[in-house]
């Protein structure tokens, strides 16, 4: 094969990110883009404890020294997988795609709770017919679920809503990364999503959010927080943006459970929109989560990315059942 393979090394991150950013030219609302990449690289190692997951499960393919294709994931050994190419034409290279599928089934696969079943959930964007055909022919089956990318178009927001910060409950105020700490974000995140005190995220969440703040596309003015009347953090939203993207991207967002239904989430969305448009009026909208809350604010599906599932039961080597298993022929 004309490509040189290597496992991911942290020194590869800038070039990997450029590969992801380039893909927006033909995939403007991807299921894995800048925000998910920065979040996975910045937060997940400290948040989950899987500090070397990418070095073990991301494969890079080079041609003439440059990364031209990559197998990516969120760094949590979940089997959820994303392929990137430097052009749609590269994605039609059957030999390359076949090799990438093989890597995904081996080094990139997750393991189910039974300790035997290896599995992959491969996101295949609508434009990539070559990958979809090859997935179907190599044992994948299309899931009945996909990944919807919801976008709030900025042109549907009344201009009056963007002239000044939105109103908050009495005593509440906006803050951002210039006057809040990473521990503030970790606190809001914990009380928004309810992970327990003995979890790795609870123990090391502050450091994980500090790591996230070191990512190249992090902007403290777009790391927005709401404080209550006692200056305690109660809601947060982080925005990621590059002028090459058609939309800014929201990841993460959380509101503490005792402050739900008070308009804090919608206020964060409006304030984030106002700040992004002040930075770059060319930005067309905001990519957010696939939840009813977002739909109620005007987010609409810009793209649905199908997912394809593969799994294989792999019997532990010392069990008698494994003696006649030819796994090489089944991947």
Image (cartoon, rainbow, N blue to C red):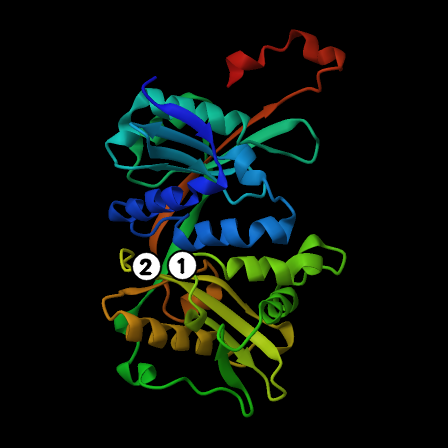
| In the image, farthest residue toward the top | 324
x, y percent for residue 44: 57, 51
Name the image quarter holding residue 114: top right
Question: 251 left or right of 232?
Answer: left
User: SS of the residue at dot 2?
Assistant: loop
Up/down of 138 relative to 191, above or below? above
Question: 250 left or right of 25?
Answer: right
**Residue at 40% from the left image edge and 84% from the top image edge:** 165
Q: Which mark is residue 217?
A: 1
x, y percent for residue 232: 62, 81
**Residue at 62% from the left image edge and 54% from the top image edge:** 47
Up/down of 67 relative to 304, above or below? above
Question: 185 left or right of 250?
Answer: right
Q: Which mark is residue 311?
A: none
Reading the image, the residue beneath label 2 is 242
Contact, mark 2 vs mark 1 (Cβ under 8 Å):
yes
Up/down of 1 relative to 24, above or below? above
Up/down of 149 relative to 52, above or below? below
Mark found first going from the N terminus, 2 or 1: 1
Mark 2 to mark 1 CA distance (whole Å): 8 Å
Quadrant where the N terminus lies?
Answer: top left
x, y percent for residue 134: 37, 24
Mark 2 Cα shell of 10 Å, populated few (<14), some (14-19), many (≥20): some
Q: Nearer the viewer, residue 39 or 120?
A: 39
């Amino acid at each position: 094969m004309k490509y040189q393979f290597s496992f991911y090394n942290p020194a590869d991150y800038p070039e990997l990110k450029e590969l992801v950013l380039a893909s927006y030219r033909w995939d403007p609302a991807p299921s894995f883009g800048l925000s998910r990449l920065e979040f996975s690289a910045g937060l997940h190692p400290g948040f989950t404890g899987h500090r070397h997951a990418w070095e073990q499960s991301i494969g890079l393919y080079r041609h003439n020294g440059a990364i031209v294709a990559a197998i990516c994931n969120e760094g949590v050994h979940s089997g959820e997988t994303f392929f990137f190419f430097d052009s749609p034409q590269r994605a039609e290279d059957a030999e390359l795609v076949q090799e990438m599928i093989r890597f995904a089934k081996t080094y990139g696969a997750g393991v189910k709770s039974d300790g035997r079943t290896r599995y992959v959930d491969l996101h295949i964007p609508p434009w990539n017919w070559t990958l979809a055909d090859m997935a179907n022919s190599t044992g994948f089956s299309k899931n009945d679920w996909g990944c919807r990318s919801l976008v709030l178009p900025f042109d549907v927001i009344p201009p009056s809503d963007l002239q000044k910060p939105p109103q908050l409950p009495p005593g509440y105020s906006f803050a951002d990364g210039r006057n809040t700490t990473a521990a503030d974000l970790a606190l809001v995140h914990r009380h928004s999503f309810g992970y327990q005190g003995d979890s790795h995220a609870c123990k090391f969440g502050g450091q994980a959010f500090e790591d996230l703040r070191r990512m190249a596309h992090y902007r403290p003015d777009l790391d927005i927080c709401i404080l209550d009347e006692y200056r305690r953090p109660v809601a947060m939203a982080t925005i990621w943006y590059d002028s090459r993207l058609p939309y800014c991207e929201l990841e993460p967002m959380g509101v503490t459970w005792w402050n739900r239904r008070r308009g804090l989430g919608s206020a964060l969305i409006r304030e984030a929109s106002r700040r992004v448009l002040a930075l770059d009026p060319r930005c067309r909208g905001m990519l957010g989560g696939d939840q009813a809350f977002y739909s109620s604010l005007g987010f609409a599906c810009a793209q649905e990315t199908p997912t394809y599932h593969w799994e294989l039961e792999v019997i532990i080597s010392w069990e008698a059942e494994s003696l006649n298993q030819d796994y090489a022929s089944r991947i």
